[in-house]
Image (cartoon, rainbow, N blue to C red):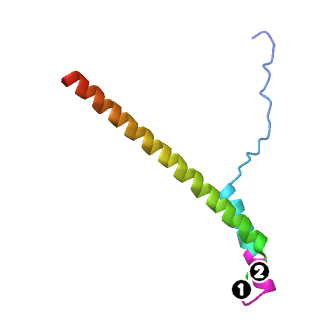
Amino acid sequence: MFGFKSKKPEQFYFEPRYYDERKEKMKKRYDSIGRQVDENPTFEKSNTDDFKTNIRENWGNSYSRNRAGNKMNTRVIIYIIGLGALAYYILF
């Protein structure tokens, strides 16, 4: 209208980053198994450090899940007992 030009929006390039922990562990495990097969075709357990870390990781994950589930179960039981006592007090 008055000869002014509007500014065009700036263009940019955004490359999204995605980290898949499960995929990373799977790749690491696949590589370690491949090394073992190449080293020992009889499938002997030669590298105990890999096995120890794998066992520790799996044990820690299941341990924390079970622990959280047990805490939630006890909390629910306490709520049920409390509500039952409150209902008994109100009704009788």
> Counting residues from the N terminus, which is met first, the one under dot 1 or under dot 2?
2
Q: Residue at x 74, y 47 (%)?
A: 17
Would you identify the image quadrant in which residue 43 lies? bottom right
Residue 41 falls within the magenta-colored stretch: yes
- Residue 68 belongs to the span the image colors magenta: no
When the figure is inspected, residue 14 is found, relative to residue 1, above or below; the finding is below
**Where are the magenta residues, as a range?**
33-43
Image-based side of 8 in relation to 86, left or right: right
| Residue type of the residue flagged with mark 1 | Phe
Query: Residue 62, located in which quarter of the rendered image?
Result: bottom right
Labels 1 & 2 near each other (Cβ < 8 A): yes
Percent across and percent down for residue 73 are 43, 45
- Mark carried by residue 52: none
Disc 2 residue type (three-letter): Gln
Within-10-Å neighbours for mark 2: few <14, some 14–19, many 20+: some
Check the image and name the residue furthest to the bottom.
42
Q: Quadrant of the C terminus?
A: top left
Quarter placement of the N terminus: top right
Q: What secondary structure is the stretch in magenta mostly built from?
A: helix
* Picture residue at 79% right of the left edge, 41% below the top: 13
Give the camera-side residue of 71 and 85: 85
**Residue at left 78%, top 9%?**
2
Q: Which residue is mark 2?
A: 36
Q: Which residue is mark 1?
A: 43
In the image as oriented, which residue stretches furthest toward the top? 2
